[in-house]
Image (cartoon, rainbow, N blue to C red):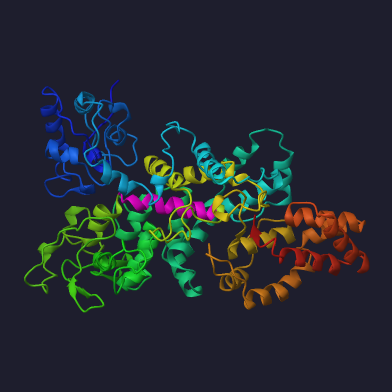
Amino acid sequence: MRYRDLSCALAILFFSAAWVAPASEATEPAAMATLRENCFRCHGEEKTSSRLDLRTLDTILTGGKRGPAIVPGKPEVSRLVEVLQPSAKPHMPPGKKQLSPEQIDTVASWIASLDPDLLPRNEDTVKAAHSSPDSASHPDESFVPPGINPSLAIDFFVAARWQQRGVKASPLCDDATFARRLYLDLIGRIPTANELDTFLGDTDSQKRDRLIEQLLDHPEFSSHMADVFDVLLMGRGDARNLSRRQRHGWREYLETSFAENRPWDQMAREMVLARNTEQTDVRAGWFLYERGGNHQDIAEAISPNFFGLRIECAQCHDHPLASEIEQAHYWGLVAFFNRGKNEDTPNGPRVVESAVGGFNQFADLSGDSQAAALTFFASPVVPEAIPEDEEEEDKDENYRSQNDGIPEGEPRVPRFSRREKFAEEILEDHPLLARAFVNRLWALLLGRGIVHPFDRMDSMHPPSHPRLLDWLAEDFRQHGHDVQRLVRSIVASRRYQLESLPADQNALPEDFAYALDKPLIAESLLASMHIALTGEASPPPEELLREFRRTFPDVMPDEPTATLGQALLLSNHLEWNALLLSERAKTVEIIMSLTDPDMQAQQAFWIVFGRTPDSEEATVASDYLRQRGGSREAVAQLLWAMVTSAEFRMNH
């Protein structure tokens, strides 16, 4: 077997591990020459990306921060081989460079020559870096078959906890409930009556899987994901914020990224670099620009969004509860971005970066101070020379030239760019990058993170399913941070498709033994109300959308709460009253075409909730319609009461 593009053991370095075993005399020199030619620049001579130094056999065997890169004697299952494939994501070496088949065989032969009984030299370190705090207390998952369908893996790990706790899970939900849940989660609205009828009329046993694919390809998928992640990444913002995000391409960037299934690690890199290059989309720079040069705000946004950690408590001292989060991590993260400032250029708004300066000190509560080094949680210190004259930052020699790939009209880029160092030395392949996104998406689709709250992945908030989180994060990373694949894996699982009514009173929310209620975001609530009343999936009025965004600002709140403003908006609204009494309210027309109040009540429940009413609901609704003589106003008021109910405002 020929190992396509095992390209530079840079990959080994990328996942960094290795075994204490001498390579054979025949293959080691040739393999090291291959590494020297292709990998040493990034892994030993100029820097040690991912903490991996490939210059000697001893340092290769020590490994880097990603854990084992090879399996001694088994190149076919070695991570190094995986990342060197032409289609690998991430691919090593970066860019378009590929090793020749002969070079790949040389490195593969070296791996094959190692003693299969050898263990990684840094085995304990690897376990500590990649395992959850309490994972040692759980059975080893080595019996989970490699290459298993991720949906089945999810069900396996979750069911293992049910068995461990003696919890009975709820049965699968019916097709109508599944359709409503999936439509809301993937495209941000309930299905229209026609869409629901089409799905229910399908007799194919694989129709749920087909609906998943249909909605992932739906143009409203990227729009809904943009609605959610705009708020998660930037905060809800007011009308001015939203207008500027639209005008300067941020909103378009999010929609395009999710429509094209851009890898999450690439999106994160583009946001922190905020640079216009062939490899990065400058529209992502609005993530930094909107924060107006407030470097602490930037740090406090980057940490939870990309690493799942809240670090505000480490501003004045090490975190009082999660001691692993240090004050040095807070100010180190600030230092990576404190040379940036907003500037309006001929090419548009940019976050420019100075070449020197920003050598700050921070003091703890005792008054002791120290320099803010370029570092972050679970990351090395990035070395940086301190110049004698910090005021000479505008010297041309401190910046790259136009020949270095900087487009015409773009700001100068420092030769030593702190933001670039952050992207390459900290963000790239950080052990929390994949875990944090997996946990956030799990919370979005299942109502609660494996770590809860989803942005507090510290020692004070252990995961409910540590092995599941480990497995999903590694699967997400190995498949190139593929967002749609992760979404598909979760929603196709049996766990996602359970009923929302608990089958066991001892089941806890963190058992995921039943579907948890999820409050609809403003955009989804308004779009769903519009469909329920008009029967059409058309955009609601923009002014009404702005009003709903102001009134329902939360996305994925830790604890959903209702406000007086929400109650007032849903109690009486002139525009909705006018809609209900107009010809646009086609649902009213459909219900009024039925003469029997019992049938009218049945139809109303089916259109709005996607279910039939129970006996008490049917009696109350039909009696109300009879008492009001089946008038248009009576039907309109019944529908309004239903779309403003707690049931309608939840995805369940």
Q: Residue furthest left?
A: 388
Is 350 covered by the magenta stretch? no
What's the magenta region? 429-445
In this rendering, position of residue 495 left or right of residue 351: right
User: Is residue 102 at all visible to an observer of this figure?
Assistant: no
Residue at 35% x, 71% y is 313
Q: Nearer the viewer, residue 196 or 488?
A: 488
Image x and y of residue 44, in percent? 13, 45
Q: In the picture, residue 597 is in which quadrant?
A: bottom right
Q: Nearer the viewer, residue 446 or 366?
A: 366
Residue at 31% x, 51% y is 430
Picture layout, residue 419 above or below residue 8: below
Q: In the picture, residue 395 is in which quadrant?
A: bottom left
Image x and y of residue 468, in percent? 46, 44
Q: Residue furthest top?
A: 1
Image x and y of residue 73, in percent? 25, 25
Q: Nearer the viewer, residue 179 or 270?
A: 179
Image x and y of residue 87, in percent? 34, 35
Q: Main secondary structure of the magenta part?
A: helix
Q: In the picture, residue 123 is in which quadrant?
A: top left
In this rendering, position of residue 639 left or right of residue 30: right
**Quarter placement of the C terminus:** bottom right
In this rendering, position of residue 185 left or right of residue 273: right
In this rendering, position of residue 278 left or right of residue 617: left
